[in-house]
Structures are given as structure tokens and as C-alpha cells.
Amino acid sequence: MNGAVGRPAVPYLDLARAAAEGGEALEAALLACVRRGRYVLGDEVAAFEREWAAFCGAPFAVSCASGTDAITLALLGLGVGAGDEVLTVSMTCAPTAVGVQRAGATPVFVDVEPERLTMESAQLESALTARTKAIVPVHLYGRVADMHGIVAFAKANGLFVVEDCAQAHGAALSGRPAGSFGDAAAWSFYPTKNLGALGDGGAVTMARPEVAGRIRKLRLYGYATRNDAEVAGFNSRLDEVQAAGLRVSLGRLAAWNARRRAIAARYDAALASLVPALRAPPPQRAGEAGAQHLYVVRVDDRDAFRGRLEAAGIGTDVHYPRAVHEQPAFAALPRGPLPETERAMREVVSLPLYPQLADDEVERVIEAVRDSVRR
Ligand SMILES: Cc1ncc(COP(=O)(O)O)c(C=O)c1O
């Protein structure tokens, strides 16, 4: 309960509600795995990979241990690695850059579109060098990056494209699913994602069988066949229990995304009039159906705004408080000027947005946001 308003708080996120929705079906699927006695890379994983590929409209899906690993595996599977430069954004969280670095490549940061906050394709040319081998755009907050511009630039310059789809499950542009534009897509099933596991998980989707084959070796010690390593690999496998849970949740993903979109539309309608004190998310691109992973508004005095919402019992979060290049581990990486990234990182605030958020909770968020802005 929140003492100030005498009503229960609206949590920023409540994953237990999603698990409760899974109910007996989820519990039965998990228990069946425990009883079956096969725990890693078994039938559940194989079935999930088929079902995830089908959902993404991709010929192949190869699961792995996390979204970060998926970026690394996708790059290595395409032949991108040591000595190569990879153009990406700093308007993301650390794992995008970590995934590139773990492949042995160097992330090079370019700035984002001022409002949509996804990769600005016009920035790519000035960051290009003889060592550039790939581009990793991020579909931040579930908004699809300018894939037409990015893929055209990649084709013109002989570069690979790996889409960071960690926040884009079910997003689409021009009738094509996010993840189907590049040479490969990296997915995270971290519990907070639109499709989340009960722990860590990830996958790479792609169209070319030889890339899928290389990634299958890389995720399992480099094995070509059992006990016979052909390449220097990793241990990055998905558990049966996670795959079983993901299969149950995948059955709900379309409905969950529809609910996310409905909540976002309600926020859009209610918050539009608060400009300029509060800037609601920009409209979608023509032909875009975003995944509405997060609902991110922008304000000038973020701490005060969040404090007022907290006092009203409304949970918020920040994605992210610091750009990647502003964090010590990445400060020395090459980059051009990043004014839009740096400005956005000081202003962004995420409001509660998850499928189990009740209508009256959505209205309470709106009321509290209006009150917080009007003061
Ligand atoms: C944009 C982005 N890229 C990569 C990742 C990494 O995924 P994971 O946490 O599964 O390694 C995440 C999620 O944390 C993410 O949001």
C-alpha cells in the first residue's frame, strides 16, 4: 500500500503475474521436464527452436544461453570477429556492446534518430572504415530501426547486418517481422522481455543453413560431432526447463503484444496533451507495428518527475541512465559525436507497461503522470 494515497502501488513490473497466467499449463510443462530426466538441448529445445523460427518467419533458429551470447554467436557465425569493426549504437544497454566485443570485434558507436532513438542510417557513412564488417542496429523499446536504410547501406558496402531484437519480439515493418531484414537476428528471453523465460535464454534466427550450422557448433564447445571440436567454441546452451516454459509463453505472445499495444495506445491518447513538459513516444514509422516492449516518455527533470510518481505509488524505471560509451568499460571505444544519445539518456523514463497491467492501473498511471507534470 502507498500511505500517501491509500491505494495499492502500481508496480513498474510484476513478472509473477505472467507466471500466474501460465498457471497449470506452465507448471505441468516444467514438471514434465523434471521427470523426463533430460535437462539440456533436448526435445523441448528442438521444438522451441522450430516454433520460434516459425513465429519469426525465419528458416532457422538456434537457441543459446542469453541475448548477449546470441549477438556474439550471430557475428561469429557470419565470420565477423577479431580485427573487425561493428557499427552499432550507444543508445542501448551494455550487452549490445559486450556481445560484439566477445566476438573479438570492436563496437563503433553512431548516433540515433532524435525522437525514435534507433540507429540513424545517415550516420553510418562517416563511421565506415576499411575494417568495418557489420552493423548491429537495436530495435530499442520495441521500435523497429530504419531497416530499409540500414540494409541498403550494408548492401552498398558489403557489410553484414545482425539485428539486436532483444526488445522486439513480434515487431514488424512493412509486413516483415523484425529480425528478417538482416543476415541474422539476436533474441533475448531474459524474464522482462516480451517473451521471457524463467531465467536466462537467447536465440539467433537466420536464413542461411551454413550460418545456423556454424552457430550450432559454436554454442556447444565447437563440436562438429560429440567429443570432436572443430572450432573454438563456447558453452551457451538453452535448458529444457526454459524451453518448455518458453513454449507455453509463446502461445500467449501474440495476445500479450496486443494488450501491450492497447495500453500504449491509451497512454498515447492520454499523454499527448502534456507536450512540451512531457514528450510521449513518437508515432510509429509508416508500416510499423512496434512490439511496445517499453513505454518511454521524456521529461527535463527526471528525478523530480520520478519522485512525484513514486510518492503517488507508481513505479518507474530508466532505460538507461547512462549511454554505453559513458560507462567506464566502453569509454575508450571509437565513436562519432552522439548528441542525441546523450540528450535522450538524461530525459527518458519508462512507465509501467506489461500485459497483466489492469485497466484501472493504467488510469492511475495516467492520472499520476498528469498530476506530476502540472505542478
Ligand atoms: C537491447 C538489448 N540487447 C541485448 C540484451 C542482452 O540480453 P541478455 O540479457 O539475455 O543477455 C538485452 C537485454 O538485456 C537488451 O535489452
Image (cartoon, rainbow, N blue to C red):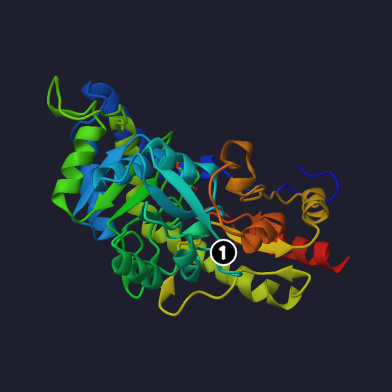
Residue 247 in picture, x, y percent from top left: 30, 44
Q: Is residue 146 visible?
A: yes
Residue 95 in picture, x, y percent from top left: 48, 42
Which quadrant of the rendered structure holds the C terminus?
A: bottom right
Instruction: Say what amino acid the circle numbered 1 marks.
Output: Leu
* Residue visible at 42% across and 35% down in the picture: 200
Residue 147 in picture, x, y percent from top left: 39, 68
Q: Does 165 sit above or below residue 103?
A: below
Q: Residues within 10 Å of mark 1 (few under 14, many from 20)?
A: many
Front residue of 90/184: it is 90
Quick one: SS at disc 1?
loop
* Residue visible at 25% across and 44% down in the picture: 77
Q: Does 273 sit above or below residue 364?
A: below
Tell me the residue that label 1 is attached to. Answer: 117
* Residue visible at 37% across and 72% down in the picture: 148
Residue furthest to the left = 225
Front residue of 307/260: it is 307
Front residue of 328/224: it is 328
Q: Is residue 144 visible?
A: no
Residue 361 in picture, x, y percent from top left: 65, 57
Which quadrant of the rendered structure holds the N terminus?
A: top right
Q: Does 36 sit above or below residue 198?
A: above
- Tell how many labels: 1
